[in-house]
Image: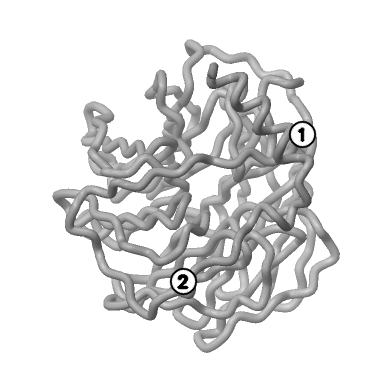
Amino acid sequence: MHMRTFKIISFYILIAIPQFLFFIPYIVLADEWILESQIAKDTWGMEEQSPKYEWGLEDLTSKHEKSDSIILHYDGKTWNCIYNGHGVWLNGIYGFGPTDIFAVGDQGVILHYDGNSWIKQESHVTSQLNRIWGSSPNNVYISGDQGTILHYNGEDWKKYTMMTANWFSSTWGLNEKYIFVVGALGKILHYDGRKWKEQNSGTTSWLYSVRGISKDNVYAVGDYGTVLHYNGREWKKFVLNTNKRLMSVCVAGSNDVFVVGADGLILHYDGINWTPQRSGTNNWLRRIWGIDSNNIFAVGDYGTILHYDGTKWNKQESNTNYLLLGIWGNRKDNLYVVGINSSSHYNHMLDVSYGTK
């Protein structure tokens, strides 16, 4: 059967099934998971979900050739395309300097930049890879679909044997012995350098981002306006006046937290109150990254890039209409963004079918 026909049939079957049937009971998690010493052999198919949201479309001119993915670089003045990938779908990016950067995406793709070119690395998996974080070039973690957690020791990638098929949306750590992974149904895993253990999040909402500044000051955000805070002992939920999907969190200081999400939503927390900020766009914001409290960047749908100067958000010209899904930088004049062509893809994390507008 033709793949396109198969996807269309699968789509109509799935939307006819109540949403709660999308998830099956998970196997009880073991207290400890270990790295696999052999190449992962299992693969999974992705279930497509019915689109639930609509996005605003801004008129932007694309100056680069059409391809499946894009990588942009910011030099402090302009955003320039430095990579176009055909057959490659990129979701996340993280690095340690201008000659040591990783980008991850669909079908287990991992690209590494050495300062001259982007070279594909062998991940040994075919699952979609969503986010990447590392404490050093020799200690890097990736979270992805179907329970995928990968570790890089500076030479090769290995997969943890996880007793779950959960979708993992994001990963972040304070150091090599203090790491969090979050995902579907409020799943939160914590790594202490020896074991991965599940923590009680107190929610079943899908979590899309986790970030912190210390062991007792960590945030996770997700569906239905979910914002969780970890105080070093337990996760507690904030009660916010929104039910929008929250996609990413940035902790610029102990009392300086930013959250971005659906319809251009930006929230700021000063340690006492959560306050909405004017973003100037209705496009969804997918990722936020902070260099310092006066240099924070948010990226999103249809080439949206915003910069916060400590007072207000200003729109920057990206010269693309791609969906921008990941951002990383080590200076205000050295940032990288990854994104995908919005014309022909479907992604369960984005919850939208492209090419239908």
- Report which residue position mark 1 lands on: 55
Q: Is residue 281 visible?
A: no
Residue at the right extreme of this rendering: 241
Q: Secondary structure at mark 2?
A: strand
Q: Where residue 177 sits in the image (x, y, percent)?
A: 31, 75
Q: Is residue 16 visible?
A: yes
Question: Residue flagged by tag 2: what amino acid is it?
Answer: Leu
Q: Where residue 270 sits in the image (x, y, percent)?
A: 69, 71
Task: Name the mark on residue 332.
Answer: none
Question: Residue flagged by tag 1: what amino acid is it?
Answer: Trp
Q: Where residue 248 sits in the image (x, y, percent)?
A: 60, 54
Q: Is residue 73 above or below residue 223?
A: above
Q: Is residue 295 above or below residue 1?
A: below
- Judge the density around disc 1: few (<14), some (14-19), many (≥20) Cα neighbours within 10 Å: some
Tell me: 242 left or right of 94: right
The one nearer the camera, 217 or 170, is 170
Tell me: 217 left or right of 352: left
The one nearer the camera, 252 or 135, is 135
- Report which residue position mark 2 lands on: 189
Q: Quadrant of the C terminus?
A: top right
Q: Quadrant of the N terminus?
A: top right
Q: Where residue 299 sits in the image (x, y, percent)?
A: 59, 40
Q: Is residue 346 above or below residue 248?
A: above
